[in-house]
Each structure stands twice: as C-alpha cells, then as structure tokens.
Amino acid sequence: MSDETRVEREGVATEREGLLATWAELRERESVVVAGTALAVLLFPYLFARAPVVSDALQGYQSLAELILIWGIFVIGYDLLHGYTGLLSFGHAAFWGGGAYAAGVFAANVSGSPLAMLVVGTVFAALLAWVLGFLSLRRGGIYFAILTLAFAQMLYYMALQPLASITGGDNGLGIGRRTIDPLLGFIPLEAGVPVITELVSTWMYMLIGGAMVFTVAVAYRVLNSPYGMVFRAIRENEQRAEFVGLNVWRYKLMAFVISGAIAGLAGALFAIHNARVPVESLFWTTSGEVVIMSVIGGVGSLFGAPLGAAVYLYIANVIPGIREVMLFTQIDKLFPGPQAVVLPEWANPAPYWHLILGVLFVAIVVFFPRGGVWGGIKDLRRTVAERLRGDR
C-alpha cells in the first residue's frame, strides 16, 4: 500500500469517526429527542395502517396504533420505577385503572372535556401513588412487590363490589361517546386533521400522540436531571447511596409518584379512547402485561417501552385474526399477481398467539437479557458504527 493510499484511508476513517461523534452528540440533545419522537408519532399510524405494501403486510389498523401509544405511555411510566430505580411493582394496574376510573367518573358527573379528564386521571393516580408508595416502600424486594400487588387487588375488589354504584361493578364504567366533549370545545375527536389526515387520521390520535411526546419529554428531562442520576444510583447500590447522605426513601417515593402519574395519564387516555373503563383495568393481569411489555422492549430504556408495547399488542391483536398472508403484492403493473394467500388450517397461527408470545418472551430474555428489543437495536447500531470506523 502506498503512502498516499494509506493517508487517504486514514483521512476517510477520521472523517467518519467525526461524523459518528457528531451524531452521537446530537441524538443525546433533548430537543432532538423530542423532535424525533414527534416525527415518529406522526409517521407511525400511516406506516402501520395505511402505507402501501407495508401496512398490507403488517395488517395493522388505526385503532391498534392508538392503543400501542397509550400502552407505550404506561410502560414508560412503569419503566421509570422498575428500569431506572430498580423497584419491581406488581400493582401498577392500580394507577392505570385508577386514572381511567377517575377520568370516567369525572366525565360522567362533572365535565366531558378530554383535557380535563387527562388532568383528573393523572392527579388522582399521582395522589394514589403517593399513598400506596408511602405504605409499600417501607419494605423492599419481594415484600414491596407483593404489597403493591395486594393494594391493586384490594382496589379491584372494591371496584367490583362496594363501589359498584360508581364503577359499574362487573360491567365496568360506561362513559359513552356523547359524554366526551370535543377537544377544546369545538374539535370532534373523531374528525380528520386538516392537511395531515393521511398521516394521523383523527384528532383522537393527535391527542394520544401529543401525550406520548409530552411523556417522553418529561421522562427524558427527569432521567437526565440530578433526580435521574439518584434513581440510577439507588438501583445500582441503595446502601452506598444512603452512605453518601441521600434520602433514599424520599427519592424512591418520588419515583413511585412520577411513575404512577404517568400510568394514570395512560389510563385516562384509555378511558377516552374506549369510552368505557372495564373493571379488568385494575386486575393483576394488567400489572403483569406491563411488566412483560417492559421486559420485551428493554428494561431501563426509554424508547424500548413503546417497542415492547407494540410487539405485545401486535401479537395479541393481529396474530389471532390472521387467516391469510401476503406472498405477492401488486405495485402498479410491475408485480401483478395474487395479493394474499389463505393459510391452511394447520398453518393458521391464530390459536397459538399465547405460545408465540411466550416463545418470543423467552427468546428475548435469553438472548437480550439486559436490553430487550431496544438493546438489540443498540447492539446493531454499535456494530455498524464500529465497521464504519474500521474497528472490525
């Protein structure tokens, strides 16, 4: 190799390394994170439910896209507690269901303003989290997890019987579409959004998407503040955090309240989206689902949370309805042919979606024990960066 060639290659490698370092710095900025989240939220329903070829292959639909964002907000709130502070809660259904019921009861008896319902659901869940956290955080480890589960189950049975006149008991709380007012008093939630209707479809999605961007902005700010650093310190070594003079219990309570408030926001969105609140919102299976979503997406990863919700809800809602697969598609006249092939009965995955979810969960835990889906994406990104720098 001549000296000129070697110098030229070293120059290219240095330039690539500089670009990668610039990109690494940019993607950590809060403004870039929020703008990137907003862009992803805008594009997601189109790619998932309406884009040619892609949406046909995925068999996605608008309502599922909205549910994925709502559950994604719930998982972000949960992961702030479990992933960043190290507190495993089995009772987060209390805040999801509590926020949903508070928003629903408020709509039925006071005001059907969607924004007011979100505020009421969030505040109620935050206050509930403060009370339950004050009691549960007196114990740690498995005792804390069981206490949160016990409190959530107590709320479930209270909603089922003693408070049935308010919650609707076994039938759940029916809110009704007509009870929920237009957004800001004059924008029907089911109406299309001018100019970008093809992207986001309805104002309902804009409300949910706005809540997602707001949640990511708040969570990112908290995680990159001194509070976030203390949360991580508690997760890594609680005793050492105490030795340096930190009031660990107070920080854990704050993490619990923030996590509960975000779960309540998601619950209120769920109540608005469905126009009813099923009593199962408070049941322990809801707490289990958010734990599974968190693990699939990646524990301790802000952007893994929506991914975990997407994977779980896709398998739970789309796989059971699959009767045919896209093997050929038609783009103008370039690729004419049949667009779908009906699956034979033995190859129909619908009856096995629980098994598929279980196998996927085990595979992620085994092969990505520390990062889930988002960890796999980060590993891939690191590998590509190393190749561009010429390290491999």
Image (cartoon, rainbow, N blue to C red):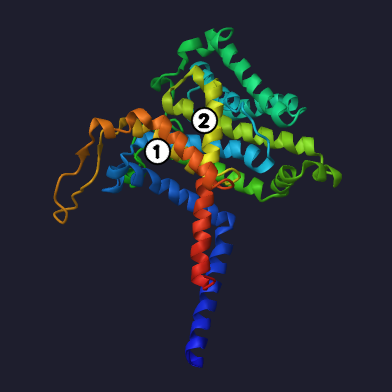
Relative vertical location of residue 233 with respect to residue 5 in this rendering, above or below: above
Q: Is residue 321 left or right of residue 162?
A: left
Q: Is residue 273 visible?
A: yes
- Find residue 128 and name its label: none
| Marks 2 and 1 close (CB-CB < 8 Å) | no
Quadrant position of residue 152: top right
Which residue is at 81% across, 39% downward?
247
Q: Residue flagged by tag 1: what amino acid is it?
A: Ala
Of discs 2 and 1, which sits in the foreground? Answer: 2
Image location (x, y in percent) of residue 23: 53, 65
Q: Badge 2 is on which residue?
A: 289
- Label 2 crowd (10 A; few <14 / some 14-19 / many >=20): some
Question: 218 or 96: nearer the eye?
Answer: 96
Quadrant position of residue 90: top right
Which residue is at 47% across, 49% downward?
38
Relative vertical location of residue 7 with respect to residue 192 in this rendering, above or below: below
Quadrant position of residue 144: top right
- Find residue 65 and name its label: 1
Q: Is residue 74 visible?
A: no
Which residue is at 65% across, 37% downward?
81
Q: Is residue 63 left or right of residue 362?
A: left
Q: Secondary structure at mark 2?
A: helix
Which residue is at 55% across, 72% downward?
17
Image location (x, y in percent) of residue 364: 51, 43
Q: Residue flagged by tag 2: what amino acid is it?
A: Glu
Q: State the separation of the CA atoms marked 2 and 1.
A: 18 Å
Image location (x, y in percent) of residue 370: 59, 47
Q: Secondary structure at mark 1?
A: helix
Q: Is residue 75 left or right of residue 354?
A: right
Question: 356 or 13: nearer the eye?
Answer: 356
